[in-house]
Amino acid sequence: MPHPALIHLFGCRASASRLFRRYTTFHSDDAFAGNGDPTERRLISEDEKALQDALHRQRKTEWKRRQGGQTFLDHVVIHVRGGRGGDGCVAFHREKFQQYGPPAGGNGGRGGDIYIKPSSHLTTLSSVPRRVVGNPGGTGSGTWQNGRNGEPTVIEVPVGTVVRELAPEDPSRAPDEWEAHEKEYEGLDDEERRARWRARRFVHFPDSAGDNEGRSAFREAIWDLIKVDRELRAQRRERNAAPLTLDLDHVEDVTIPVDAPLGRPHTQNLGRLVASGGEGGYGNPRFVGPENRSPKFATRGYDGERVSLALELKILADIGLVGMPNAGKSTLLRALTAGRAKSEIASYAFTTLNPFVGVVRVGLDGSIMGGTLQELVHDDTVMEKQRHRELLESGALAHAPTRNQELNAAAEEAPETALEAFRFTVADNPGLIAKASENVGLGHSFLRSMERSSALVYVVDFSGPAPWDQLTVLRDELEKYKPGMSKRARMVIANKADTIDSEDVGAVVQAKGKLSALEEFARAKMDGLDVVAISGKYSQNLRKVVRLMRGYVEDARREPLQPTYAYTSSTSNL
Ligand SMILES: Nc1nc2c(ncn2[C@@H]2O[C@H](COP(=O)(O)OP(=O)(O)OP(=O)(O)O)[C@@H](O)[C@H]2O)c(=O)[nH]1
Ligand SMILES: [Mg+2]
């Protein structure tokens, strides 16, 4: 019953009732499905509600990751279809004084193949088309002219992409060419199926379809095609049993022969074949036999192979930083690379939305290379930009040395530090929070890029009361992503140690106690991880961090290479 004030507001009881109904439906505590009509509404089960919530969160996550024009993508599924073969042609040769010439229909051309090729010009999978259909082969025509073959199509992907063909049971796989045809035949009786199959396989001379049916040459051709179908199906089954996996981690210089006109190169580097085009159909001369001198039918081209490919971009970094939002991972990466890694820093959660790799260069004396830049304070990006703008506007930077001049000056001052002793890469990652495996926050799909990091480093905010709580959450989330992954963690970095007031004796004692407790926790509960207290913002105590990291990387590089690719099917965002 609507409130009297609503009736007064809307002037009539009907409008007020409508609004009242909508309002109560929308705000009702129970969740309903249906179009709002009470008779059609039904209570949503708990599972459905959880699924809807998860889908909603997934959309929100994806939307957030694409903010600010960032189209970084590291995992996509694409559907690829080889080009269709061209149809054969039914024709008879005609010439002056030769009214009934021999059969002269050309064969159809082959459909274009699809190749995949790594390219060093690409850095993300965002430009890779989600659907690729190969070029069709040309149809044959009269006077024995064969159709032209379809041009091959090359899909370019960034170097470091792993290509995996989806197995038949994978839910995101599109049906292959045979399954697609089976779907077309669903619900048809045998007679209709046969008629459809023939229509898909044969071309008839005008008004000759009925006549052809009764001829033995046509029946033989049907048997031949049935055999070909069987062979193709067997090939498909073999392919399904051993899906393709390619690790495109370098640009290959492999050339293959291609059709090209005279004067053009007859070999090209197209990459690796992923889906072949269909064979072209035969023209009617193919079916000439002792009993049938003028066959009035030809065959149609075959469909190209259809495959669904999961493309995954591996970011290779020696060390991966794992931490909760705002722990200071991006600040640490900036400090470790002496300001060269321009990762965004801000005091809000989820500043970093995609993994970011920086190179750490270690000098002969164990310092981080970067000269005078080491004294920089790595503050929030907006503040740094603002400060820079103020300096620029005031003219203070008019005669300032350039970045390279600064580096050179530093090298001249201390030549021994200018020699590089070691180099490794560190990946900064988005923040990981509790329940990330249920797609809370940014989810944890970005951990995929860390699967190949040889060592992981936890970064915790040391200014909080119980930094060890963060460690437990991080370890659990890593384990949920992939059992055994937390074993790769080697060190705990207690960041923001500068927040302790060094003048306040009580605070210093308390911080020391907290550090001992953290060390004890790491020793007892986390398999004896190293613990280092640092300040990323002011680049304090980083030498120790670099020394330890170098040790982990050297260990890993000495070990034999791990298997290049291990796929986890449960890493989707849902
Ligand atoms: N005082 C102090 N502040 C720091 C330190 N390191 C980082 N911060 C501040 O902490 C805030 C978060 O730093 P970020 O580096 O963006 O943190 P993050 O872990 O990358 O955060 P997400 O990208 O959101 O996961 C920023 O305001 C930094 O200035 C530090 O060592 N000392
Ligand atoms: Mg960050």
Image (tube, rainbow, N blue to C red):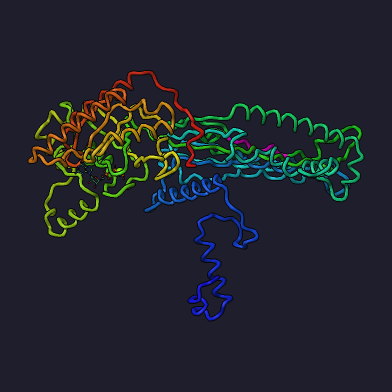
Residue 250 visible here: no
Q: Ligand 2 shows up in which quadrant of the image?
A: top left
Tell me: residue 561, above or below residue 25. above
User: Is 214 on the left-hand or right-hand side of 242?
Assistant: right
97 displayed left or right of 433: right
Residue 449, how many percent across, how many down?
Answer: 40, 35
Q: Is residue 537 magenta?
A: no
The residue lying toward the viewer, choosing from 78 and 435, is 435
**In terms of image quadrants, where is residue 187?**
top right
Q: In the image shown, does 9 or 239 lie closer to the viewer?
A: 9
Residue 205 locus on image (x, y percent): 84, 47
Q: Where is residue 431 in the image (x, y as percent from the top left)?
A: 34, 41
Examine the image and state in which quarter residue 334 appears. Answer: top left
Quarter holding residue 374: top left
Looking at this view, is 452 or 277 the one in front? 452
**Residue at 90% of width from left, 35% of height from top?**
216
Write the start and end of the magenta stretch as one range. 274-280
Give the quarter of the figure containing the N terminus: bottom right
Position in image of residue 525 (x %, y %): 31, 25
Q: Left of 271 or right of it: where is 150?
A: right
Residue 269 vs 40, above or below: the answer is above
Residue under the point 31% across and 23% down: 527
Main SS of the magenta part reads loop
Q: Which residue is drawn at 20% across and 47% down?
A: 379
Q: From this viewpoint, which residue is outermost toward the bottom?
A: 11
Q: Can residue 119 be seen in this view?
A: yes
Tag count: 0
Q: Tell which of 269 and 209 is nearer to you.
A: 209
In the rendered image, the vertical position of residue 344 relative to residue 168, given as above or below: below
Q: Residue 278: within the magenta? A: yes
